[in-house]
Amino acid sequence: MAELLFSFNKDTLTIKPPKKASLVLRLMLSAFAMVCGIYICSICLKQMNLQNKNKFLFFDDFERPCSDTIVDRSQIPFLHYPKPKTFNRSECSGNPVRLFAIVSMQRSGSGWFETLLNSHVNVSSNGEIFGPKSRRNNVSSIIQTLDTVYNLDWFTSSSKNECSAAIGFKWMLNQGLMQHPKEIAEYFNDRGVNVIFLLRRNMLRRLVSMLANAFDKDAKLLNGVHVSHVHSPEEASLLSKYKPNINITSLKSDLRGMESTSMKALNYFNTTRHIIIYYEDLIRDPSQKMMQVEDFLKLPRMNLTSQQVKIHKGALSEHIENWDEVNKTLSGTAYEKFLQADY
């Protein structure tokens, strides 16, 4: 009996240590599993917070329009969703707006071109907004004016406001544009402004138009009122009766200066998204050229019209008082081609 008891006790002694080891091992495994669980949960929480934060930043910085229309990703920088301070775009707030600037020189057909463009139901072109010097005293005043126009807070008779698909204006090269080309080019690129160059090849015809327009400012041939553009053949015929006497001494240098100004403008803004339209091509085929402009601005094509009438038609010899002297001065030069153009 004593042997059995001893044997039992001995067996008991040999069995108990594994039970204690198993208990400790279980406790260690439980503790390890708990630590791992807490660690994994903390990582998951951090990832969820990061995703929520990124999601918030995405929608905050790149607010999507109310329209889910699929567009070419390359066009995204040129799509804008203005929030005017002066009115509510209401149901059109989700319609994208493209920004543009018509860069030109006086008496290059810009008035006619703009009326054609404004006949589009979705276009608002606001004329020569930089005519007043106060709007172009410095870069700050220029940018402030640009921001007002492109935010749809600029009101003219051509403003279509809520549902405009393209908003812009005319900017003449002598209205501060050439004085601050670097800053303006940066603004155009940053804001995704589409630049439409409207230029004239025949600078001699432009000179005739400039001199005739300057004369009418004092003469006021149409019932005592000066007008830069006319809307009837009778008015055009009356204004075209004046024939300027051109200074042949400075003629070649004047023409050279005009061409140089145009080339400088093209060089200054060649980094922008732009299109070049020449007045002569527009005269020959206005429908085709305006379709190019509509495509450039990504606008639906429409039949564009204007009430304006061209003033100086036909050969230049009919519109220059000292034609023989002008003809002799330019014959044999790079500007001889200007003498023969008939339109």
Image (cartoon, rainbow, N blue to C red):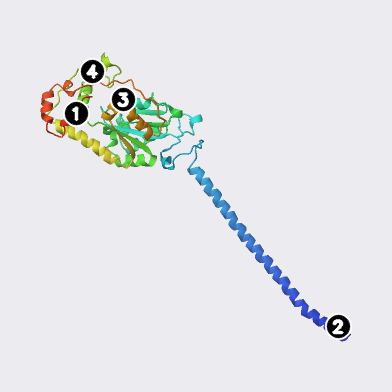
Instruction: Decide which of tag 1 and tag 4 comes sooner along the chain.
Output: 1
Amino acid type of the residue tagged 1 in the rendering: Leu
Would residue 4 be seen by someone viewing this image from the given angle?
yes
For the view shown, which residue lies furthest in the bottom direction? Answer: 3
Crowding around mark 3 (Cα neighbors within 10 Å: few <14, some 14 to 19, many 20+) is many
Instruction: Decide which of tag 1 and tag 2 comes sooner along the chain.
Output: 2
Instruction: Decide which of tag 1 and tag 3 comes sooner along the chain.
Output: 3
Image point (38%, 42%), residue name: 190
Badges 1 and 4: C-beta atoms under 8 Å apart? no
User: Which residue is identified by label 4?
Assistant: 239
Whole-number angstrom distance, CA of label 2 to CA of label 4: 138 Å
The quadrant of the rendering that contains the N terminus is bottom right
Image point (11%, 24%), residue name: 324
Instruction: Decide which of tag 3 and tag 2 comes sooner along the chain.
Output: 2
* Callout in the foreground (1, 4): 1
Camera-nearest residue between 162 and 144: 162
Give the label on residue 112, or none.
3
Badges 1 and 3: C-beta atoms under 8 Å apart? no
Crowding around mark 2 (Cα neighbors within 10 Å: few <14, some 14 to 19, many 20+) is few
Amino acid type of the residue tagged 4 in the rendering: Leu
* Callout in the foreground (1, 2): 1
Q: Position of residue 130 (x, y in %)?
A: 32, 31
Q: Is residue 89 above or below residue 57?
A: above
118 relative position to 105: left or right: right
Whole-number angstrom distance, CA of label 3 to CA of label 4: 17 Å
User: Which residue is identified by label 1?
Assistant: 204
Q: Is residue 17 above or below residue 312?
A: below
User: Which residue is identified by label 2?
Assistant: 5
Amino acid type of the residue tagged 3 in the rendering: Trp
Residue 171 quadrant: top left
Residue 341 quadrant: top left
Q: Position of residue 125 (x, y in %)?
A: 37, 28
